[in-house]
Image (spheres, rainbow, N blue to C red):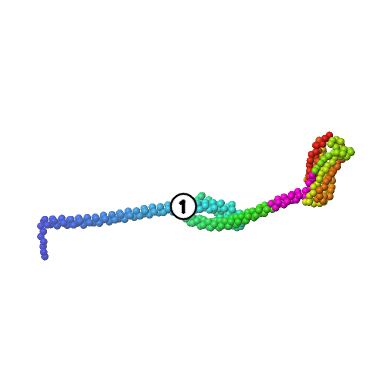
Amino acid sequence: MLVYLYSKSDLLVMKQENNFDQEMKKGRRFVKMGGLLVVIALLGLLILGFSSCNSKTDQMQAQIDSLRLVNDQLQLEGEYENLNTEFQQYENQAQYLQNDSLIEKYSEAKNKVEKLLAELKTQKITSGKRIKELKDEISSLKKLMRHYVAVIDSLSKENAGLKAENKEIKATNKQLASKVSDYTQKNEVLSQRMELAEKLNVTGLTFSALNKRGKKEKRIGKAVQLVVNFTVPQNNSTPVGEKTFYVRIVSPEGNVLGAGNTFPFEGGNVVYSERKTIDYDQQEQNLTLYHNVASALSKGDYIVEVFVDNYRLASKHFSMLK
């Protein structure tokens, strides 16, 4: 057995070394405990940070969801506004929908648009489910609207075709009417030409006075008889047959000499002085008519007119001396 002998100095050194080791161990324990506390503190901070982040994330998500709902609501409102405008645009063409059930569905859809539009404007929608319901209704209404538009366009085109056809028919009728009018005018001209061709004429109209000896008298005051003479020229276009000539002698005072007998003329009755009926054979004839003076005549301008077949063939002025 070995026995070591230490000096006081060695013991002192050994004691100091032992104390140092204990201090070192104690220091290491403090370091370990401090590190553990730091780790615990860090973990606590991390947990708090995560908790705070989760809370902020939830708040942000809630804000995003709220904004999304508001955006969806505004979008829906805009789409309903557009649908309502389209309905109003085609509303005045509903008469083309010649179908009672279709018009009824059209009215129902229009009223539904207005009702849902009022709901969007007066209420704040916070339910995603309600937003989806409104979107589905919009989709249905759009399909219905497209159907209405297709029907209206089809009927409008059909109506436009009928209008074009009607316009073409009117144009054709107008052309026919114009042709008929042209033919009518031509026929009228031909008729007038035929009437003019058939119309008799008189030439050499004279007016004179005879005295009681049957001689021509220049002074009208001594006349006992008035004589009207004229010639009917040859006219091969005038139908042959009986013709009655009427003669009117108008005094300077405007009175028609005679017994007041009348003949029809231009829808009325005209007073005449003398008349003569002949058998016209298209050859030239000379006619003389006599009028007996019943009362004293005054000097002045006398008018002599000749009528036949509702025509006034001649009107001539004669100045007679007293």
Residue 201 in the magenta stretch? The answer is: yes
Residue 205 lies, in percent from the top left, at 80, 42
Q: Nearer the viewer, residue 59 or 31?
A: 59
Label 1 is placed on what type of residue?
A: Asn
Q: Where is residue 9 shown, x and y percent of the image?
A: 11, 55
Q: Quadrant of the C terminus?
A: top right
Residue 37 shown left or right of residue 209 in the figure: left
Q: Which residue is mark 1?
A: 71
Q: Position of residue 85 (x, y in %)?
A: 54, 51
Q: Residue furthest right?
A: 213
What residue do we see at 78% from left, 51% from top?
Answer: 236
Using the rendered view, name the quadrant where residue 247 is placed. Answer: top right
Q: Quadrant of the N terminus?
A: bottom left
Residue 63 visible? The answer is yes
8 drawn magenta: no
Name the residue nearer the viewer: 6 or 285: 285
Decide if residue 159 is on the left or right side of residue 4: right
Residue extending farthest to the bottom is: 1
| 189 vs 116, nearest the viewer | 189
**Nearer-the-camera pick, 306 or 119:** 306
Magenta highlight: main SS? helix
Measured as percent of width and height from the top left, residue 240 is found at 81, 51
Element marked by disc 1: helix
Q: Is residue 293 visible?
A: no
- In the image: residue 93, left or right of residue 9: right
